Image (cartoon, rainbow, N blue to C red):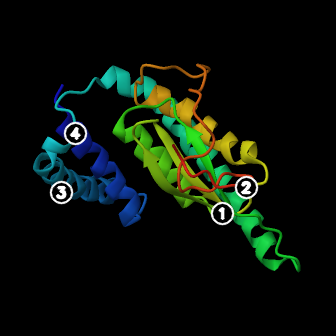
C-alpha cells in the first residue's frame, strides 16, 4: 500500500486534535474532511521524503509500542521537570554537568532522530551530536555524576523504537561497546580525552 495516503489520513486525525472539535458528529466529520483534504495534499507533496510503501498490518502491530513510547516519554518529561525545578530552587544548586556518550542499537534515521529529539525535549538533557561512525549520541546532562541514570530512560525509549521502526536488532539485544569519551568531548566524570 502506498504510504502517502496513510500519512494523509494520520494528519487528518491530528487535525481534529489541533482544532479542538466539539463532540458532535457533524462537526467532527466536517473538520475531518477538511483535515483529510489538507493532509492528503501535504502528504502527496512530500511523498519523496519517506518510503513509498507501507504495511498497514505492520503499522497496527507497532501502534501499541508507539503508545508505550509516548507514555514513557511523558512520564520522564514530568519527572525531569520536577527534578530541574528542584535543582534550580535548591540553595546549593546541585548540578554537575557533563556529556554522556550513548551507543545506540537503532540504526535508521527516523529512529535516531526520534530518540535524539526525545532527549532534547526532556528538561536537563540535550542531544549535542551524533557520531555516525560509532552510531552514538553525545548527551549533555545537567547532572552527569551517574551516567546510568541518564542512559536508563534512553534505553527504554530505544527498546520501543526498535519495534516501532522495524529495526534489525530487537529489545534486549546487547548494546554495542564503544569508548566512553571521544576527542574534544568531556566524559561524564569530567575528564577530557584528546583522541588518537
Q: Nearer the viewer, mark 1 or mark 4?
A: 1
- Name which of mark 3 and mark 1 comes first in the sequence: 3
Q: Nearer the viewer, mark 2 or mark 4?
A: 2
> Which residue in the protein does label 4 denote?
50
Looking at this view, is 92 or 66 the one in front? 92
Residue 16 in view: yes
- The residue that disc 1 covers is 124
Instruction: Name the disc covering residue 170, or none.
Output: none
Disc 3 versus disc 2: distance between alpha carbons? 45 Å
Query: Which comes sooner in the sequence, label 2 or label 1?
Result: 1
* Residue 140 to residue 4: above or below: below
Q: Between disc 1 and disc 4, whose residue precedes? A: 4
Task: Tell me where residue 67 appears, x and y as whole percent.
Answer: 53, 38
Do the residues under discs 1 and 4 have CB atoms within 8 angstroms? Answer: no
Nearer the observer, disc 4 or disc 3? 4
107 shown above or below 74? above
Residue drawn at point x = 36 percent, y = 33 percent = 108
- Left or right: residue 148 versus residue 108 is right
Q: Secondary structure at mark 4?
A: loop
Q: Earlier in the sequence, mark 3 or mark 2?
A: 3
Report the residue at 43% width, 41% height from top: 112
Amino acid at each position: 500500500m502506498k504510504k502517502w495516503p496513510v500519512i494523509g489520513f494520520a494528519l487528518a486525525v491530528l487535525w481534529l486534535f489541533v482544532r479542538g472539535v466539539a463532540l458532535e458528529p457533524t462537526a467532527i466529520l466536517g473538520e475531518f474532511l477538511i483535515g483529510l483534504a489538507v493532509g492528503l495534499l501535504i502528504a502527496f507533496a512530500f511523498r519523496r521524503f519517506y518510503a513509498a510503501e507501507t504495511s498497514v498490518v505492520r503499522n497496527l502491530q507497532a501502534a501499541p509500542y508507539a503508545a508505550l513510547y509516548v507514555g514513557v516519554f511523558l512520564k520522564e518529561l514530568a519527572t525531569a521537570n520536577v527534578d530541574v525545578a528542584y535543582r534550580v530552587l535548591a540553595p546549593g544548586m546541585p548540578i554537575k554537568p557533563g556529556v554522556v556518550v550513548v551507543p545506540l542499537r537503532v540504526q535508521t534515521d527516523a529512529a535516531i532522530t526520534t530518540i535524539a529529539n526525545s532527549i532534547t525535549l526532556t528538561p536537563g538533557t540535550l542531544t549535542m551530536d551524533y557520531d555516525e561512525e560509532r552510531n552514538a549520541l553525545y548527551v549533555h546532562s545537567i547532572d552527569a555524576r551517574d551516567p546510568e541514570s541518564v542512559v536508563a530512560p534512553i534505553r527504554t525509549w530505544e527498546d520501543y523504537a526498535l519495534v516501532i521502526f522495524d529495526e534489525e536488532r530487537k529489545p534486549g539485544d546487547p548494546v554495542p561497546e564503544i569508548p566512553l569519551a571521544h576527542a574534544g568531548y568531556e566524559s561524564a566524570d569530567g575528564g577530557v580525552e584528546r583522541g588518537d
